Amino acid sequence: MIKKKQLKYFLWITPFFSFLIGYFFLYSFIRKKEIITPRFIGRKVQEGLLVASKCGLNVRVLREQEDVDLPAGIVIEQIPSPGQKIRPNQHIFVSVSKKPKIPKAPDVVGLKVSDITKQLSKLGVQHSSFFLSLPYPKETCIAQAPCVGSLLTKRKLTT
């Protein structure tokens, strides 16, 4: 026969075991299983957000990278990689393309060729110079194309 002390001990611990058994029982039925990471690379960010929200994932833009060839807003890379198993509500970090800024043509008229080279190299603009024999000081710019303030779409300046 069970002694009264043993019965009191058993009744005292029973609610805790019942709670644990109920918790694990509900957890096994309610929890979401692992999700396979969808491919976001090559898609627009808006499309990726729609796919991520359907899967219960969070997308975070890690960085924007300048790319001349791609339109703005295309996913270039993602972490974790496509096809990996992840948890629901996990973050997916993506790098997105953006168009580089197009510089405007600076005013180089009256500057020496060496100064023009320094100024344009800072802007990432190539330049070519044509020399004429005129009564102006040697190696000094007297004209430029395109004109001051124009967009340098080809990133070239002629002096």
Image (cartoon, rainbow, N blue to C red):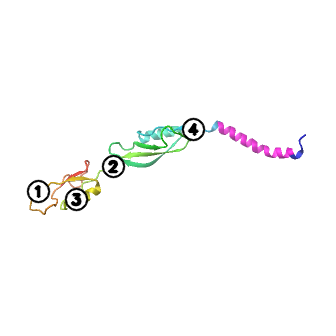
Which numbered disc, 3 or 2, marks the residue closer to the eye?
A: 3
**What residue appears at the point 16 percent right and 56 percent down from the top-left corner?**
143
- Neighbor class of circle 1 (other Cα within 10 Å; few <14, some 14-19, many 20+) is few
**What residue appears at the point 13 percent right and 62 percent down from the top-left corner?**
138
In the figure, 137 relative to 78: above or below?
A: below
The type of residue carrying mark 3 is Ile
Which numbered disc, 2 or 1, marks the residue closer to the eye?
A: 1
What residue range appears in magenta?
6-28
Q: Nearer the viewer, residue 150 or 79?
A: 79
Say which quadrant the C terminus sits in: bottom left
Q: Which mark is residue 34?
A: 4
Distance Cα–Cα, label 2 vs label 1: 35 Å
**Helix, strand or loop for disc 3:** helix
Q: Which mark is residue 132?
A: 1
- Give the percent coordinates (x, y) of residue 88: 56, 41
Residue 19 part of the magenta-drawn span = yes
Q: Chief secondary structure of the magenta span?
A: helix
Q: Which residue is mark 3?
A: 116
The type of residue carrying mark 1 is Leu
State which tag comes first along the sequence, 1 or 3. 3
